[in-house]
């Protein structure tokens, strides 16, 4: 669960910095209009690489992995293992 | 005889009824289906009170309904007004009030925004695409009811409306310099002329598969929605999330076997830098067109090397004329760091380069490009003030003028006859008395190997001149700082043109089409200077 919490904290507090006001659920679509934009995706990649000490190859930065906090956490955990 | 934009759709529907005209996610519409559905919508709109020459709003995210909406509206004899699905409601209401929109085509996911919009648009009578409810005052009709109503009527032929090629087909709103949006009016004549000329220039056929990357309210979308159907081609509408993830976008290009790509350079630079292109087979792409802003040559060369099978073209033309020049890129080995030319005025169009006195400049000198072309707008909706300034008239006979659109862009004819784009006329500033083209500084900045993207803007000073401000996004692995970039510029530009200060940023404010919003950068810098 820790991965999800860390990602959520970064997305809500740093990426969106209070924008959208409310909470973002682990299975909410991050890529819908108005949530995170293309440059914020890049910031999210940089953050995750540093925080989880891994490299995310460009071909893995896809909708499949970045659709929700859940899918991203699952992907990152699979790389840690 | 074909003289209206929807005639082109009907002709292709006769030739290729079962061929796909539009694809979106896992859905598609064939030509026969789009023809029938847009007929249905046209009957519903007329039933709801749409008159010939009305303006009907389109407020939709990327979806197949966008195509049904624009063809349905045109078949009803009205002009479609595409609204930015992500813009603030008050701005949309401003555009709708400006051209008197009484009917709107939309979808249930826009309901919250619609509640805010309708509060500011008292003349809006009917909304197609959402169910009625207490939160919406105008009459509402869901898409289901549109199909049901027409099925009962058993009416599948297009409505019998008298429409002429000089009637308006669409109005696109663009930000004005004062912040008041202005509506660019295009007729069936100018729209169909563009569709015909673009199909001929790029040899589009029914075997082509076109990208639709541009939002509907941005003028590049007319190639995807109007030229594609004229040729019987298939247009693949790219779902919004793909535009944010270049590695998914490149997967989509491969899976959909796209043959023609058309977008702003930004989308292609993202594909180049983060699209994992070396992992994809994009050999289906035969032609890549870009426009809207300059493409830094170093990125373009890198992209061309990754996609050796595709032709590349720089497409130029303000939304007011659709397109008016093209430049087909030479082999990559012949491209150096000078800005990519905008090329030659295309067929059936005339361009002049005028000096400050409205006289043509001597060959080789720079001036404002003015063009006349059948693809030119009628003018700005309800803006006699702008229309008086937008056109240059060349007297030919008594009471007979050739009418040219003033692009506001500075160009220069080069030795090989192609046109070089020097920048916006209003991006020319005086620094300590010297004339500086901000776009030229920006081009030098983008030439730095560690700079991913750069933007340059003017910070007005108290003496009526300006200082030059700049912001850059550095490459992720860049080992340079602002001082190093400034030192690089000092080697490439005259001293007065070098920005005194460069902000290193992680992102730029952008317009909804992906262009860098230089006005926002300038506003930010001016505020910081105060």
Image: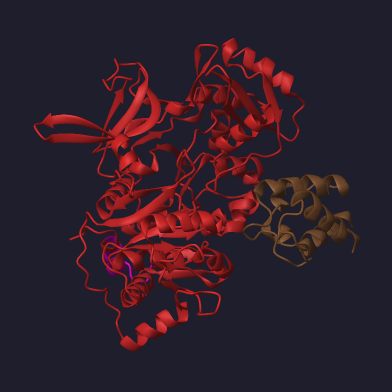
- Percent x, y of residue B260: 45, 49
Q: Is residue B443 above or below residue B288?
A: above
Say if the magenta span includes residue B67. Answer: no
Q: Is residue B66 left or right of residue B417?
A: right
Q: Nearer the viewer, residue B31 or B284?
A: B31
| Residue name at image x 62 percent, y 12 percent | B491
Q: Most extreme residue toward the bottom, as rendered?
A: B152
- Percent x, y of residue B383: 34, 45
Q: Is residue A23 above or below residue B321?
A: below
Q: Specify start and end residues of the magenta stretch as a single range.
A: B8-20
Q: Quadrant of residue B426?
A: top left
Q: Most extreme residue toward the left, as rendered?
A: B398
Q: Nearer the viewer, residue B107 or B521?
A: B521
Chain A is shown in which shade?
brown
Quick one: which chain is red?
B
Q: Is residue B156 left or right of residue A1?
A: left
Q: Is residue B476 left or right of residue B404?
A: right
Q: How is the image coloured?
A: by chain
Q: Is residue B275 above or below residue B330?
A: below
Say if the magenta span includes residue B10. Answer: yes
Residue B55 in view:
yes
Q: Is residue B286 above or below residue B349?
A: below
Magenta stretch, main secondary structure, is: helix
- Percent x, y of residue B313: 43, 37
Q: Nearer the viewer, residue B457 or B336?
A: B457
| Residue name at image x 81 percent, y 46 percent | A47
């Amino acid at each position: 669960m820790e991965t999800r919490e860390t990602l959520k904290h970064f997305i809500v507090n740093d990426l969106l910095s209070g924008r959208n006001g409310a909470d973002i659920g682990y299975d909410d679509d991050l890529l819908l209009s108005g949530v995170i934009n293309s440059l914020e995706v890049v910031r999210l990649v940089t953050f995750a690489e540093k925080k989880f000490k891994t490299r995310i190859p460009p071909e893995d930065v896809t909708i499949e992995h970045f659709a929700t906090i859940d899918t991203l956490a699952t992907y990152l955990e699979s790389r840690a293992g | 005889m074909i003289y209206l934009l929807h005639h082109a759709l009907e002709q292709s529907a006769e030739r290729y009824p079962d061929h796909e005209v539009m694809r979106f996610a896992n859905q598609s519409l064939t030509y026969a289906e789009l023809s029938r559905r847009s007929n249905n919508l046209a009957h519903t709109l007329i039933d709801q009170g749409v008159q010939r020459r009305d303006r009907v709003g389109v407020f939709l995210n990327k979806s197949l309904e966008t195509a049904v909406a624009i063809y349905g509206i045109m078949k009803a004899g009205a002009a479609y007004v595409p609204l930015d699905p992500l813009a603030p409601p008050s701005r949309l209401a401003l555009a709708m009030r400006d051209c008197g929109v009484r009917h709107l085509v939309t979808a249930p996911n826009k309901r919250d925004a619609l509640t805010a919009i309708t509060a500011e648009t008292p003349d809006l009578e009917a909304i197609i695409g959402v169910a009625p409810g207490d939160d919406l005052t105008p009459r509402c009709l869901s898409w289901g009811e549109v199909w049901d109503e027409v099925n009962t009527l058993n009416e599948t032929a297009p409505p019998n409306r008298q429409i002429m090629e000089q009637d308006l087909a669409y109005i696109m709103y663009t930000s004005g310099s004062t912040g008041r949006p202005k509506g660019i009016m295009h007729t069936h004549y100018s729209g169909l002329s563009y569709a015909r000329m673009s199909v001929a220039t790029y040899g589009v056929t029914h075997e082509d598969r076109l990208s639709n990357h541009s939002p509907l309210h941005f003028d590049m979308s007319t190639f995807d929605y109007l030229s594609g159907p004229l040729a019987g081609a298939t247009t693949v509408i790219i779902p919004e999330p793909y535009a944010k993830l270049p590695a998914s976008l490149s997967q989509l290009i491969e899976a959909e076997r796209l043959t023609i790509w058309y977008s702003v350079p930004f989308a292609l630079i993202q594909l180049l830098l983060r699209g994992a292109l070396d992992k994809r087979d994009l050999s289906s792409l035969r032609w890549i067109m870009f426009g809207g802003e300059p493409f830094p040559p170093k990125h373009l060369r890198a992209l061309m090397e990754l996609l050796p099978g595709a032709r590349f073209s720089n497409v130029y033309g303000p939304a007011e004329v659709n397109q008016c020049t093209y430049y087909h890129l030479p082999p990559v080995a012949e491209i150096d760091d000078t800005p990519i030319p905008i090329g030659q005025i295309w067929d059936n169009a005339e361009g002049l380069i005028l000096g400050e006195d409205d006289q043509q400049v001597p060959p080789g000198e720079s001036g404002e490009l003015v063009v006349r072309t059948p693809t030119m707008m009628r003018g700005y909706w309800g803006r006699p003030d702008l229309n008086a300034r937008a056109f240059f008239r060349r007297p030919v006979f008594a009471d007979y003028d050739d009418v040219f659109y003033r692009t506001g862009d500075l160009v220069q004819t080069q030795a090989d006859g192609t046109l070089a784009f020097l920048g916006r006329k209003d991006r020319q500033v005086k620094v300590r008395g010297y004339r500086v083209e901000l776009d030229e500084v920006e081009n030098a900045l983008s030439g730095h190997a560690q700079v991913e993207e750069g933007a340059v803007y003017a910070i007005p000073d108290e003496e009526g001149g300006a200082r030059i401000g700049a912001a850059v996004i550095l490459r992720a692995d860049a080992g340079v700082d602002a001082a190093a970039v400034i030192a690089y510029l000092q080697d490439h530009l005259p001293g007065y043109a070098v920005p005194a200060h460069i902000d290193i940023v992680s992102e730029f404010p952008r317009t909804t089409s992906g262009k860098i919003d230089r006005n926002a950068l300038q506003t930010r810098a001016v505020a910081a200077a105060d």
